[in-house]
Amino acid sequence: MRENGMTNPKRSDIISNSASPMMNIFRKGLLHGAGFNTDKLQTRPLIAIANSHTELTTGHSHLDRLAAKVHDGILAAGGECAEFNVPAPCDGVAMAHDGMRFVLAQRDQIADMVETHVRSQPYDGLVVIAGCDKINPAMLMAIARLDIPALYLSGGPGQMDIRNTANPKQSIDHGDYHDDLFHLSKTATCATCGACEIMGTANTFQCLAEAFGICLPGTSNIPGWHADKLDAARRTGERIVEMVKEGLNSRQMFTPAAFRNAVNMAMAIGASTNTALHLPAIAHAAEVPFSMVDFEAARDVPTLLAISPNGPFGVQDLWAAGGMPAVLKQMERYLDTGCMTVTGKPLKVSIDAAQVIDSTVIPPVEKAFRAMGAITVLRGNLAPDTAIIKQAGVSEDMLQCKGPAVCFNAEEDAMGAIGAGKIKQGDVVVLRYLGPRGAPGMPEMLGATMALKMTGLKNAALVTDGRFSGATSGPCVGHVCPEASAGGPIALIEDGDIIEIDIPNRDLTLHVDDATLARRKAAWTPYERAVPHGYMRTYRKHVRPACEGAIID
């Protein structure tokens, strides 16, 4: 038996013990130059730390401190480690300008970077550290592809400068203060490091990591600024060494049953609509069959939580109330509790150990926030291949609505029209040629949705082949497939056409007869958005539809 309990060959053994004595000397020399004790590497597992730390964004600015604690944990547990970094784009910083087109595209690039780096270097295990939006699913994609011992560590939520609302029944939301410029600015000001304190894409996937069992139980919702997060980082480092010894690989967590658990929990937590992009992408990486049908199968799972922008609580409230383990406990009837977790034990063990501290924030199923799940898949003649809406963020009086279309091929044009008072209550704003191929890059439409909210147009709807921020609420339909650039019906809408959104019946209808649509299709010329020379030309050629996860394949 080797030092520290290692009995099986390690991937890193190739450094010193390959069939080529000369290459063994050469490799050891290179690592010596980087400060490694190569004798220790012969007996200790070598762990990669993929860190998305960046100085630019609040969700990632603190991850260097977490990485240092992961280092400490690995060394204390008898391992060695090496850290590398990946890009960490912030959706908020990229919002409402051309940079937004590049953010989703980076998800697949980040996954590629982590995968290819770890495959090219002889690491025995992997810890990924991520804070926001596309980086979280990207890291999970990489873990799923690699199928080695791996652990996810979240950066945790941050805190906005203001956490209370004008009306305690409303969400922590900019729209609550649209007539109060001082408090409005406070809602957009981050007071601490960590992901925006709403159930957006960042916190959605931090939560879903616990549903997958790919992180240590109870660690996902710890605020980024809290001392407990540093302790969680150290424990993560300690545990990855044990996972290597046990041979506990990531695909033992990424099973078909685990994906069903993740979908059900997405419904329960009030997840971002971007979940419908990223879960298919992670499933593809794990080679697990998955489609929009999986979301449709979860239609009867209730929205348990009322987390902003859907309700009055923040993610820190969720953490204080017991965190995701408590949510899993309340939702146990909707889970396969036999799924394996990174603890080496089934999900049932974590659930049994969980405590619901505040049932106002994490209520029993019988007192769920909404009877329907957070994400609703719509079909109809306007979306033959599906569209997505976050019904948990739609007021009861707007679950069914219809009105005349007002069409735009660019978000900035729509925002200008809204600002100029050209959009009326009851209108349906149509934003098209903004899908994965058409934009290209499928940008978020937070600028347009925020403009509607800030001008008080609560009864105006929006339909797009683009996507939304987790901060979006109201009757906003996205991910319309086929997209306009692929000749989908959304490309054929004309101003004044009546569009009907019927969430209870899962329907999205363009009230134009088939003969008229056929004539329009025959005369249709695609709108071509200019794409500068570079990566996005390649992306446009190879990206798959939104309903398939907008993956590069």
Image (spheres, grey):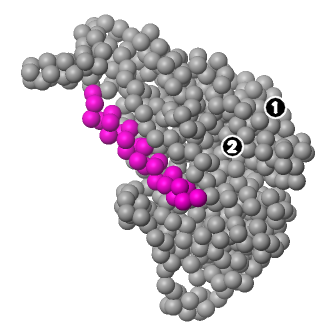
Q: Reading the chain from its start, which is encountered first: label 2 or label 1?
A: 2
Q: Is residue 84 positioned above or below 132 on the image?
A: above
Determine crowd level at label 1: few under 14, some 14-19, many 20+ residues with C-alpha closer than 10 A: some
SS at badge 1: loop
User: Mark 2 sits on what residue?
Assistant: 199
Q: Is residue 502 positioned above or below 112 on the image?
A: below
Looking at the picture, how far across and down is residue 144, in whole percent?
42, 40
Report the span colored magenta: 97-122
Looking at the picture, how far across and down is residue 533, in whole percent?
37, 63
Looking at the picture, how far across and down is residue 429, in whole percent?
70, 72
Three-letter code, disc 2? Met
Point out the image quarter for the N terminus.
Answer: top left
Residue occupying image coordinates x 51% and y 25%? 64
Q: How far is mark 2 from mark 1, CA to CA?
A: 18 Å
User: Mark 1 sits on what residue?
Assistant: 359
* Residue in the foreground of this view, choosing between 433 and 204: 433
SS at badge 2: loop
Dominant secondary structure of the magenta stretch? helix
Which picture quadrant has residue 385? bottom right
Looking at the picture, how far across and down is residue 446, in whole percent?
67, 57
Three-letter code, disc 1? Ser
